[in-house]
Amino acid sequence: MSRAIYPGSFDPITNGHLDVIGRALKLFDDVIVAVAHNDEKQPLFSLEERLDLLRETAGKIDNVRVAEFEGLLVEFARAEGAGAVIRGLRAVSDFEFEFQMALMNRKLEASVETIFLMPTEEYTYLSSRIVKEIARLGGDVSAFVPACVAKALNRKFNR
């Protein structure tokens, strides 16, 4: 059985993330969507809220499991029996950072490959940061995120 990890902060999950998950499922038997603990970031949604939103969206897709992890991604991948890490690339600007991380992960654990997947063209501009900014300014994000996420964003911004 082939297994991949799709790590991220998912603050919040977007339709672009869901698109990458769908693409990953064409390549792997199952995908673990893993939310990283990152004390350096100040997320809008708590870890538990992000996990709940992921379970309500990605967690309902066959062969997708939602998990959280701390520490090194490659150690989590090894513990889960995953041979690959999935990373989404939207633009060339994403590549440099992702390339450095992939090379470091390879150095730490050569048996875990990094696979870069591009979302469909309609999501190449989409990011959680942009979605949060649109929602904060009162814009309609329903075309960019699942309905439960749009509702959660409205609650966060008291709308």
Image: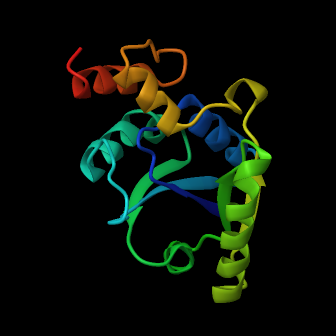
Q: Nearer the viewer, residue 135 or 9?
A: 135
| Side (left or right) of 81 relative to 148 | right
Q: Quadrant of residue 84?
A: bottom right
Tell me where residue 113 appears, x and y as whole percent: 73, 71
Can residue 14 be seen in the rendering of this structure?
A: yes
Tell me where residue 55 appears, x and y as whole percent: 38, 41
Q: Quadrant of residue 134?
A: top left
Q: Residue at x 73, y 77 (%)?
A: 103
What number of labels is visible? 0
Q: Is residue 25 above or below residue 145?
A: below
Q: Residue lying furthest left in this view?
A: 158
| Side (left or right) of 79 relative to 88 | left
Q: Residue at x 48, y 38 (%)?
A: 129
Q: Nearer the viewer, residue 142 or 129?
A: 129
Q: Is residue 24 above or below residue 132?
A: below
Report the coloring of the rendering: rainbow
